[in-house]
Image (spheres, rainbow, N blue to C red):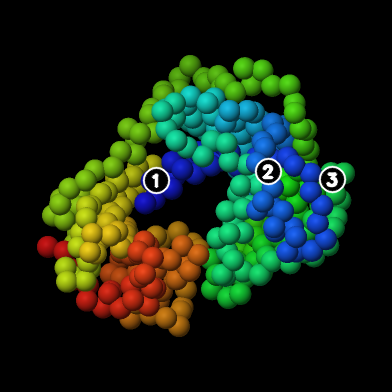
Amino acid sequence: MKVKKLVYGVVVSLTLLAGCSGEMAASSSEEIISNVLDSEKKFEPYYAKAVMKHYEGKELMGEIDIEEFAGTNGKRKIITNDKLKDNAAGYAVNDGEKILSYEEGSDVAYQMDISKEELPSTMTQKEQLTMLLEGIKETHDVEMAGEEKILGFDTYHLKVKAKSKDAILGDMEYWVDQKTWFVLKSITTTGDIRSEMEYTEIQFSPDFTDDTFTLELPENVAMKNMEDEFQSQTGTVEEAVKAFGKSFLLLAEKDAEIEHIEWYELKGEINRTEVTVYYKKDGIPSLMLSVFPTPEEPGMEIKESEVKVRGQNTEIMKEINSISWDENGIRYSIIIQHPDLTVEEAIALTENMIMSK
C-alpha cells in the first residue's frame, strides 16, 4: 500500500541511520557479518551532518544536505536542504509522542500521534544493517573489501553484490565503523541509478535539551493529521471500482478468495486512487493485489523483460516476492504473502484473471 509506505517512510526518516555501540574486532567477511548480527543492541545518541546524492548515469539528479539530532527514547529531528531546489528545507521531528513533518514555504504541516503506537522508533543502524543482510542472503554476496578511515574512524568496507542483474536493490557498498557499527558511508547502484550518502560530521553523546526536539511553525501554517489525510476506506468490489473510476482485473474466484478490499484517495503530488485487494486461500493470507494508474513520471516505466505476465513486460522483485506489470493504463502489483506460494505459481494465477463488474 502506497500510503502505508508513505507514513512508514516518515517514521523511518526519523529513525534512519541511528548508531549503535559495542566494540568488535573482525578479520573476515564472515566474522564481520556474524558480529553485526550478534552484537549487543545499545543505542548511543548522536548529532550528525551528511550529504546524500542521486545520479542517473553521470548526471547529478539530486543533492540533499542532512542534519540529524538523534536522542534517546526514539526522539529525532531531521532537517534536509535540497541543494538543487534553492535549498528548500524540510523538517521531520519525533518528540516521542508525535511525529511532525513540514516543508518550508508550505502553509500546511502534518502530525501523527504515536503515543499509543508500536512504531520502529528506536531502530539502530545495527538493526537496519541486520535486517538488510538477513533479507538479501539469497540474492546477494557479501565480502570485505578492506579497511579505511572516514572522519577519523576506522571502518570496514563491505561490498554487497547482487547475484542477478534484475535484483531490485542492486549492488551496495558500506563503510562501517569497527567499534560502533555506525554506517558512515554507503553507495547503492541499480542499473544506471546510483545513490550515495556520506557523513561529514558526527558527535556521539551530545548535550540535547527538550527544545532540541521541537519545531516552531510560521503563524500561517495549518496543522493537519496524517491519519485524516491518508485515511483508507474499505468496501465491496463495486465500491472500489466506483472509487477507482473504472474496472480492473481481479483473480478468479476459484484461485483465491477475497478477504477484504481497501483504497486510498491520494492528493497532492501523487494525486491518485489506489486499491488493494487482500486474498486468502484455505483461510490463510495468500497475496495482495494493488492497482493504480500507470505512472507517467520518467524512470517509473517497466522495462523490457524476458518474463511476461499476461503478455506484458514484468518487474519481479524477489527480495519482497512482488510482481508488477502495466495493462490498459493500470499498474498491477502482486505481493506474495503465503510461504508456500511461488512467484511462478502467482504468475500462473494471473492468466485466469477476470474483469471486475
Residue that appears at 46% across and 62% down = 320
Q: In the rendered structure, are the residues bearing label 1 and label 3 in contact, judged by CB atoms less than 8 Å apart?
A: no
Q: Identify the image quadrant of residue 136.
A: bottom right
Frontmost residue, 129 versus 212: 129
At label 2, the amino acid type is Glu
Residue named by callout 1: 4
Residue named by callout 2: 40
Residue named by callout 3: 153
CA separation in Å, label 2 and label 3: 20 Å
Rate crowding at label 2 as few (under 14), some (14 to 19) or many (20 or more) other CA atoms within 10 Å: few
Residue that appears at 66% across and 70% down = 141
Query: Seen in the image, is 226 located left or right of residue 83?
Result: left
Coordinates of residue 60 in the picture (x, y in percent): 67, 56
Q: Earlier in the sequence, mark 1 or mark 3?
A: 1
CA separation in Å, label 1 and label 3: 37 Å
Q: Earlier in the sequence, mark 2 or mark 3?
A: 2
Question: Dot 3: what SS?
Answer: strand
Coordinates of residue 277 in the picture (x, y in percent): 26, 57
Furthest toward the bottom, the residue is 306
CA separation in Å, label 2 and label 1: 31 Å
Up/down of 311 relative to 78, above or below = below
Question: Dot 1: what SS?
Answer: helix
Q: Earlier in the sequence, mark 2 or mark 1?
A: 1
At label 3, the amino acid type is Phe
At label 1, the amino acid type is Lys
Q: In the rendered structure, are the residues bearing label 2 and label 3 in contact, judged by CB atoms less than 8 Å apart?
A: no
Q: Identify the image quadrant of residue 163.
A: bottom right
